[in-house]
Image: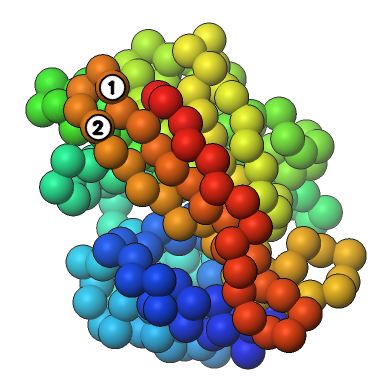
Amino acid sequence: MRSDIAFLTACDVVAAGADHVAVTGDLTNAGLPDEFHEAACWLDALVARAADRASVVPGNHDAMAEGTWAAGAAQLGLGGPLYPWCRKLGPIALIGLSSALPSLPLLATGTLGEAQISAVEAMLAGAAAEGLARVVLVHHPPGETTSWRRALSDRDALGAALSRSGVELVLYGHNHRHETVRIGTARILALGAPAASAAYGTAMEPAGWHAIAIEGEPGAWSVTVTLRRLQADGRFEDEWTHRYRL
């Protein structure tokens, strides 16, 4: 992890005036206390200790051993939230899932389990009844974008639940690159986030982040996504902007 680049990314997010920051996991490499301390400093740079302005779900690197994420969440000031959780931000409901759990060597799989999937379906139905735009956060890709060694084991069950209940947008991490996929029978829009700490000019995509604006009303939501990308001179620039009708 290049912490200097991660802080450059944080500075660009702050300069853009983001209302809320969604982090889809892998704040650390091995879930060590020193790494969580650095991640806490990074979150502080993003939202200046305003915990209500950031929503975080864990990645597999944050849960390398039993209890790692619970301890790390306390260091991050998250209080070890239960999953799924739902946060209402004006006309938007953010719903967080945890797919992170310790896995065998050479594997980086994730699992949600029946209880989480059932609970998120109920949360989505409740948010729809309130006329909210629903955004789900999860670390592992909900679509077929990675090998079985790194996949979400119950992604088909998640896709079926999301298709039944309806959801406007899914945000995920894990692959450390920008991706746009459609999932479930409802062809739900899902966006994979680039890494915040990847150097320019390596095999990985350089650091980036999505600026997302959701507008409209129930039945007629739209989302505008701008990919901000690290350049060779250390600045961030808009790479592209797309508008989706949901």
Q: Which mark is residue 201?
A: none
The amino acid type found where label 1 is placed reads Ala
Find disc 1 in the rendering and name its residue: 220
Taking depth in this image into account, of 137 and 7 the one nearest to the observer is 7
Q: Which mark is residue 216?
A: 2
Label 2 neighbour load within 10 Å: few <14, some 14-19, many 20+: few
Residue 109: name its quadrant.
top right
Residue name at image x 40 percent, y 24 percent: 246
Residue name at image x 52 percent, y 52 percent: 226
Residue 141: name its quadrant.
top right
Left or right position of 139 against 206: left
Looking at the figure, which quarter contains the N terminus? bottom right
Taking depth in this image into account, of 50 and 25 the one nearest to the observer is 50
Residue name at image x 74 percent, y 68 percent: 206
The amino acid type found where label 2 is placed reads Gly
Residue name at image x 67 percent, y 73 percent: 230
Residue 137 in picture, x, y percent from top left: 42, 45
Question: Taking the image as drawn, is residue 51 in sight?
Answer: yes
Circles 1, 2 touching at the beta carbon (< 8 Å) = yes
Residue 210 in picture, x, y percent from top left: 51, 56
Taking depth in this image into account, of 139 and 207 the one nearest to the observer is 207
Taking depth in this image into account, of 36 and 89 the one nearest to the observer is 89
